[in-house]
Amino acid sequence: MRKIERERVKSQVEKEKIESARRKAIPDLTRAIEELVSGRKKPQELEGIIAEAKTLAQQWKDPSSAKHLKDRRPLFDGTSSNVAFLLAALVVALRRDHELLEPIRRRFPDELDNLSSAVCHAELRELGEALASTRPKPTSRQAYERERRKWHRNFYNSIEYQFGGEREADLRKSGLTGLLGLADPLWARMSPPTCLDDIFAGVAVNMQRLEDLFFGIDRHRLSELVSERNRIKRGREVRYDYRAVAEIMGNLLKEPRKKRKRFYSTRCGNPRL
């Protein structure tokens, strides 16, 4: 029995390693395809990931080459290009997720949509908390300005307020949860954050809307955090969708703490830290 149990545990560990490697391969392959096709990197700079891609691509068999799966030959051979190998490997890596999600999407579409929305809100909450935790401790003057500026009407539409915990804190202070007899998690589900609803719906917003979302960061700074590819130009007007919002969040989290502090002190006067 002990031997059987050891073998079972060993098999489970091996499966977890394979699954972990597959999940890691998906972003690596995507990045390699983008860098190779765009010309940012040459094939010799991507030898490692291309070798992994060739191994993965071998799992894709030609269904017309033989009746039985074990006798089929790989669909991609040595004459295929590096891009073809990378794309084939990406399909192989994603196939398991597709096979898992497709029956769920077909049988429980509403539940899948609800779960997807819950995941988005959870990740945005974590991003808001991470942004708040990396800010330098404010001076007494900055703390005063922060409290004073909280009452600006646009602050309540910000990611920081709705996902960073201050919304729940204000709700507890107001006594509404006690009055309604509701626990905070239940109230949060009944009245979820709404500042990103239009972004999730695919609406492209203007710079003023971005200033609301990232309250305390001026338009010049926000413009520096968005690349040209994520700007939607309509004549003289520039709009921003979910890709721009995600890019701003990512760039803010990547910045060294000293750089953030130096920028705020020289450009923003009294920052929201």
Image: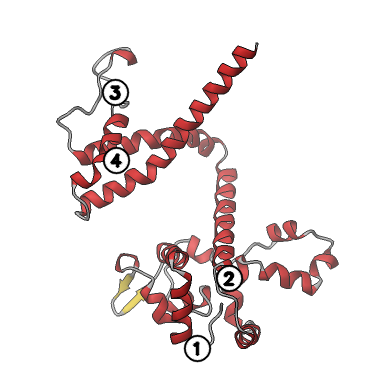
Q: Position of residue 6 (x, y in %)?
A: 59, 18
Residue lying farthest to the front in this orientation: 258
Relative to 108, is 202 on the left or the right?
left
In three-dimensional space, the C-alpha distance between marks 3 and 2, rounded to whole angstroms, equals 49 Å
Residue at 33% across / 69% down in the picture? 232
Q: Quadrant of residue 59?
A: top left
Which residue is the site of mark 4?
A: 49
Label disc, if present, on residue 61 of the rendered structure: 3
Q: Amino acid at mark 4?
A: Ile
| Cβ atoms at labels 3 and 2 below 8 Å apart | no
Relative to 218, is 237 on the left or the right?
left
In three-dimensional space, the C-alpha distance between marks 2 and 1, rounded to whole angstroms, equals 19 Å
Mark earlier in primary sequence (3, 1): 3
Q: Residues within 10 Å of mark 3 (few under 14, many from 20)?
A: some
In three-dimensional space, the C-alpha distance between marks 4 and 2, rounded to whole angstroms, equals 38 Å
Relative to 269, is 50 on the left or the right?
left
Mark earlier in primary sequence (4, 2): 4
Which residue is the site of mark 1?
A: 269
Vertical relation: 13 (above or below) 85: above
Quadrant that contains the C terminus: bottom right
Q: Amino acid at mark 2?
A: Glu
Mark in the foreground, 3 or 2: 2
Marker count (numbered): 4
